[in-house]
Image (spheres, rainbow, N blue to C red):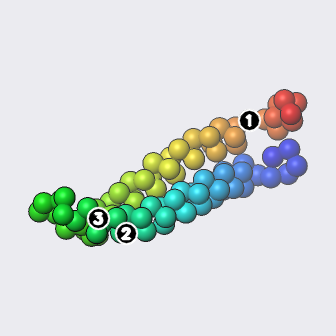
Amino acid sequence: MAIGAAPGDILKMVLRQGVGIVAIGLIVGLAAAFAGTRLLADLSYGVKPSDPVTYVAVATLLLAVALLACWIPARRATCVSPTVAVRFE
């Protein structure tokens, strides 16, 4: 904001960076989960190892929590005065 960015731009930048990291983690985690279902198929009784509802629910919940965890510091960053931020750096 000290060099001309709007608060909305700062919010978008921080959210984009945080959600990008979470998206990569979700892709890797879902791939590992699908690969691990063959190993754990014998241990789960009465539940299909590749239950799509469970995968979608867990991925959605994780994405929502990560979005909230990124939004809180991003919102705080937009409230800081640029002169105060530059003074501490």
Rendered position, 78 above or below 60 = above
Circle 3 packing at 10 Å, graded few (<14), some (14-19), many (20+), is few
Q: Which residue is mark 1?
A: 80
Residue 51 spot, x, y in % from top left: 25, 68
Q: Which residue is mark 2?
A: 35
Q: Judging from the image, what secondary structure is the residue with disc 2 in?
A: helix
Query: At x 45% / y 48%, what residue is drawn?
Result: 65
- Whether pointer 3 and pointer 1 mark residues with C-beta atoms closer than 8 Å, the reply is no
**Is residue 56 in view?**
no
Real-space Cα distance between discs 3 and 1? 50 Å
In-front residue for pair 38/7: 38
* Mark 3 / mark 1, whichever is N-terminal: 3
Residue 50 spot, x, y in % from top left: 27, 70
Q: Which residue is mark 3?
A: 39
> Mark 1 or mark 2, which is nearer to you?
2
Real-space Cα distance between discs 3 and 2? 8 Å
Is 38 placed left or right of 19 in the picture? left
In-front residue for pair 36/85: 36
